[in-house]
Image: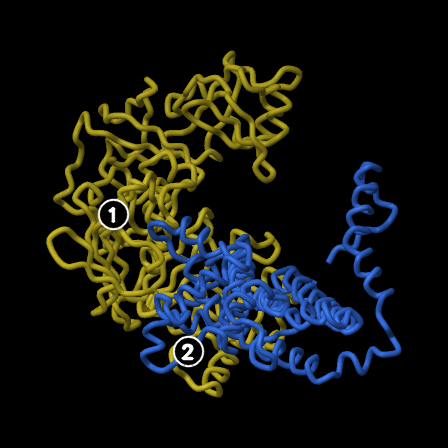
Chain colours: A blue, B yellow
Amino acid sequence: MSSRSSDTYAGVPGWVVTLAIIGAGFVLLPLIAMATRVNWGEFIPLVTSESSVAALWLSLRTSLTATALCVLLGVPMAVVLARTEFWGQKILRSLVLLPLVLPPVVGGIALLYTFGRRGLLGQSFEALGITIAFSTTAVVLAQTFVALPFLVLSLEGALRTVGTRYEAVGATLGARPTTVLRRITLPLVLPALISGAVLSFARALGEFGATLTFAGSLQGVTRTLPLEIYLQRETDPDAAVALSLVLVVVAVIVVAIAHQAGEADGFRLRRTAP
Amino acid sequence: MTGRSEPGPARGFEYGAGSEPGSGPAIGPMPGASPGPVFEIEAEVRARGFAVSLAVQPGETVAVLGPNGAGKSTLLTLIAGLLRPDAGHARLGERVLFDVGAQHRSRWLPPHARGVSMLAQDALLFPHLSALDNVAFGPRSQGSSRASANARAAEWLERVGAEDLASRKPAQLSGGQAQRIAVARALASEPDLLLLDEPMAALDVSVAPALRRMLREVLADRTAIIVTHDVLDAFTLADRVLVLEAGRVVEAGPTREVLDRPRTPFAAGLAALNLLVGVRDGDAVLTDGGHRIRVSGLAAPPTESALDLGAPPENPAPASAPPSVPGARVGVSVRPSRVSVELPDGSPASGSTPGSVTALHPHSHPAATSDPTRNVLRATITDLEPRGDLVRVRSAEIAADVEPGLVADLDLAPGREVVFSFPADAALAYPL
């Protein structure tokens, strides 16, 4: 990456810098404020209590499963959106990205009327003896629903940037479409795939509204970390703050990984002689 | 179809030179010398105004020339299977690549099943794979084991002289090195037909000759189609050329034939020849610009003279060739280096004697206007363009290559009226 040396004239107006500092403060100050309220003496017992550990463990399990589902479904979605042309594609793309802007509670209600006991598909599942609503499966579905657009969005952009030239070369060398996807397309967009997956994981980990609506809050079954924090806030604010800090740390790690993958993106596509 | 084995009736007859077109020097293909399928295509893409048919014999290399937007790349993408035609068919030996028409069911072979590989202007090496893995990609995709694919890749890297680059990533290669490896990669997939889309265009002039030499070697007995802007590529690599303009074939034939006797201004420009077009008038040609050009051999029976800049004739002109048809359209080609320039009053330069100019500039003939065997064209200079160590002096109808000293001596500049002249034996006339 190009590192701008400090003696290069940048031409950024002073008022822009001022507003940027205020913006950064707006994001960082609440985190600092929360850190000042952490009861450090009780920190370890608070985050290792039975309900906390159950919530943390459930959150990690469901978020990882949701991320895997996002990759499984999101990669084909991104490929189809980026590489094919069909009628209504633009509308479909907008609709697929809808969960990004939809209030999660609305998403939860929509899921309930799809997979719930009396839902569109739920009735069929019910006949087979499978209940989805208010189970761990529901948590995973809710998280996948809200996180999927992140992966599709970042991957589709990368696919368009990479273009089809390498894929065409691969095809003329005798590689079938599946071979081209596996050996050319996916390696080329791997950094975007990683950063998209990390963002999806982060979104799944923080999911609250859709989960509460669609999956409820049963300890060890559907009560994920954000739900646990919300409940603890009423009874034990110290535990809520401690658990919040855990989530912040996880989020910082996730952002760092995503940023790293994004940096690699620029490196991989550079094609210059030494 | 434009197979080289069928010279059209118009091509069999020729003024001035005794060689039969189509019987070029030893650069022609040797049928039977290299087994391989015949390639044929006839395709139409209406949205691009493209309608071309072409046949390539086994082991033959055909160069496709033409201005930008003429449809050269369209032709290659159609053959590779990256674009569907509106109508047409193509086959490579027994394999039908596509057959799209109104009356029957369409057939369409996807690119990976065609046995056609393509080398583009950019090497387009897969950036995440090493040079060796890039070359091994084709064999691997066709089902070879990793070991045998790697062995074949190593073999090809050696053939293109890049064995020491095997473990490098594309980002660590220069443009010339990358293009060498791209050639190895294209050939390692053992295509029945190789397409080259301006393979030298993106390279430094310093590395292009080495790659051209290497391509000449690997294309020697291979069926290939090369799109190029460079007339040198056509001469060194191709047996035949096809000139496309606005989606149509405007000229086709053996390389020397087309480039020595251009029929279109584009081909004349490529071959760096003057092309004067007109009608036969006795022993001369009356050009559309109103000049009467005497051409040696037009009156006399054809002889093997210096006129024929092309191949030594293998066959005498066929007896069936019409000897002369007054009024028929005729092209006259003249090399700019054989055209001289002087001032209208006959004094070539102010401040220097005619004799000294002649000594300095062998191509300038001060007495030209009075010499009855010289053709004289009075014209206004439109443009001066340095070409190597000569200067090309252009007018609307004719151009001359003169030494820079003459330009200074005669004070040549655009807008100036001068006299272009060339001897009758510098002109080659042929029917259009």
Query: Badges 1 and 2: C-beta atoms under 8 Å apart?
Result: no
Q: Chain letter of disc 1?
A: B
Residues B398 and A265: in front is A265
**Residue ID at (60%, 60%):** B175
* Residue type, label 2: Thr
Q: Hey, which quadrant is residue B354 in on the image?
A: top right
Element at badge 1? Answer: strand
Residue B295 drawn at (x, y percent): 32, 30
Q: Nearer the viewer, residue B97 or A219?
A: A219
Density class for disc 1 (Cα within 10 Å; few <14, some 14-19, many ≥20) is many
Query: Could you tell me which residue is drawn at 43 percent across and 50 percent down?
Result: B228
Q: Can you tell which of label 1 and label 2 is closer to the viewer?
A: 2
Side (left or right) of A221 relative to B261:
right
Q: Is residue B16 left or right of residue A257?
A: left
Q: Is residue A87 visible?
A: yes
Percent position of residue B205, x then y: 59, 52
Residue type (three-letter) at the residue carrying disc 1: Glu
Q: Residues within 10 Å of mark 2 (few under 14, many from 20)?
A: some
| SS under mark 2 | loop
Q: Is residue B250 visible?
A: no
Question: Which residue is nearer to you in this view: A27 or B328?
Answer: A27
- Residue identified by numbered label 2: A131
Q: B157 left or right of A225? A: left
> Which residue is disc 1 drawn over?
B44
Residue at 48% across / 67% down in the picture?
A: A75
Could you tell me which residue is drawn at 34 percent across and 72 percent down?
A123
Mark 2 belongs to chain: A
Residues at marks 1 and 2, CA–CA distance in whole angstroms: 58 Å
Q: Quadrant of the C terminus of chain B?
A: top left
Residues A16 and B6: in front is A16
